[in-house]
Image: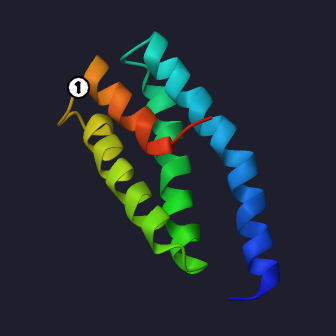
Amino acid sequence: MNREAIESFVDEIRDDMPKLRRAFAIMHACLDDRDATLEAHRLTHSLKGTAALVGVGTLSQIAGLQEQLLEKLVDGRLTMDDQLRDTLERLVGPR
């Protein structure tokens, strides 16, 4: 993997992780906030794809699992509760 691609990936993570944490904070405060859920899904999808492109397979797999949960929230197959919210937040990792 070339250095430029990895640096771009690191920059993307630095920009997107606070946005993802913010979306989860909104979801924490308001369990049915659709805009926050859609934003979390978009950011997670992007993270999954970019991680796969730069060869960070484990991160891509974790983001893929998180994306699946968020997709189920978006399309109504799951409803947000404290346990699901906590799981999603743990998948993002420590601050």
Q: Position of residue 53 (x, y in %)?
A: 57, 79
Q: Secondary structure at mark 1?
A: loop
Q: Position of residue 37 (x, y in %)?
A: 44, 32
User: In terms of image quadrants, where is residue 22?
Assistant: top right
Viewer-proximal residue among 80 and 13: 13
Q: Position of residue 18 (x, y in %)?
A: 68, 36
Farthest residue, direction left: 77
Relative to residue 32, is residue 15 depicted above or below? below
Q: Quadrant of the C terminus?
A: top right
- Compared across the picture, whether 65 is left or right of 1 comes to left
Viewer-proximal residue among 94 and 65: 94
Q: Position of residue 63 (x, y in %)?
A: 43, 56
Viewer-proximal residue among 89 and 45: 89
Residue visible at 32% across and 46% down in the picture: 71
User: In terms of image quadrants, where is residue 3?
Assistant: bottom right
Relative to residue 19, is residue 50 depicted above or below? below
Relative to residue 26, is residue 20 depicted above or below? below
Mark 1: few/some/many CA within 10 Å (<14, 14-19, 20+):
some
- Compared across the picture, whether 12 is left or right of 49 comes to right
Please indicate, yes or no, whether residue 80 appears anywhere in the rendered image: no
User: In terms of image quadrants, where is residue 25?
Assistant: top right
Q: How many marks?
A: 1
| Amino acid type shown at disc 1 | Thr
Residue visible at 36% across and 27% down in the picture: 86
Viewer-proximal residue among 41 and 93: 93
Q: Quadrant of the N terminus?
A: bottom right
Q: Pointer 1: what residue? A: 79
Q: Name the colour scheme.
A: rainbow
Residue visible at 29% across and 44% down in the picture: 69
Relative to residue 42, is residue 39 depicted above or below? above
